[in-house]
Image: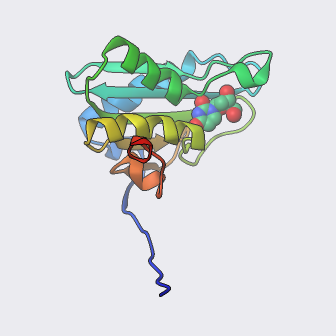
Amino acid sequence: MISQKSISFQITIYDSFDELKNKDQILMSAAVKARERAYAPYSSFNVGASILLENGEIIEGNNQENASYPSGLCAERVAIFYAGARYPGMKIKAIAITAASLNHEVSEPAAPCGNCRQAISEYEFRQQEPIKILLMGEVGRIIECNSLADLLPLGFNSSFLN
Ligand code: THU
């Protein structure tokens, strides 16, 4: 028998930074600060990511590029690997991501790349609790996703290895 199924998910859209709840503004502001410290001399595309931990602490990361291009790493993975290294096993409540280019105005929310989705999903699957994702460009609307799993349907996780 053949069956078909559609997969959908809900997002919340905020017209601007000012519409965010205060604690999300604080998290996104940390991502903006991190973005401003990005090392992206090759793409001129600066990304910042901030992570809210269960203990209330905010961990930041930004993209770190390399003359050997593939050796660089995205902001999200710099941040989440740092969180995992600094606070192993600590639950992650939310991640805010923002991008700005030196060449044009980024007015649409910056979506995490596939590798970063997979990396974040490892932590979400491990903690068995959703991680909220906030996405912003340099200006403009902000998209809130309820979980990483929404952004990576039919994802691969450790359950396949057992
Ligand atoms: N980048 C990120 O930091 N996060 C993403 O999710 C997408 C891309 C970085 C990688 C590279 O340094 C630059 O943006 C251009 O691709």
Q: Residue at x 31, y 18 (%)?
A: 88
- Can residue 100 be seen from the camera position used here? no
- Residue 40, position as x, y percentages in the image: 69, 21
Picture coordinates of residue 53 (x, y %)? Answer: 27, 25
Extreme-front residue of the structure: 162
Residue placed furthest toward the top: 86
Q: Residue furthest bottom?
A: 1
- Looking at the picture, does residue 155 appear above or below residue 81? below
Q: In the rendered image of this protein, does residue 31 appear above or below residue 121?
A: above
Res 45 → quadrant = top right
Q: Is 142 situated left or right of 22 in this image?
A: right
162 or 141, which lies in front? Answer: 162
What x and y, as percent, mark residue 79?
46, 22
Depicted 12 relative to depicted 55: above or below:
below
Query: Is residue 113 rendered to the left or right of residue 156?
Result: right
For the point 43% across and 69% down, the residue is 7
Residue 148: image location, x then y, percent: 40, 46
> What colour scheme governs how the chains and residues are painted in the rendered image of this protein?
rainbow
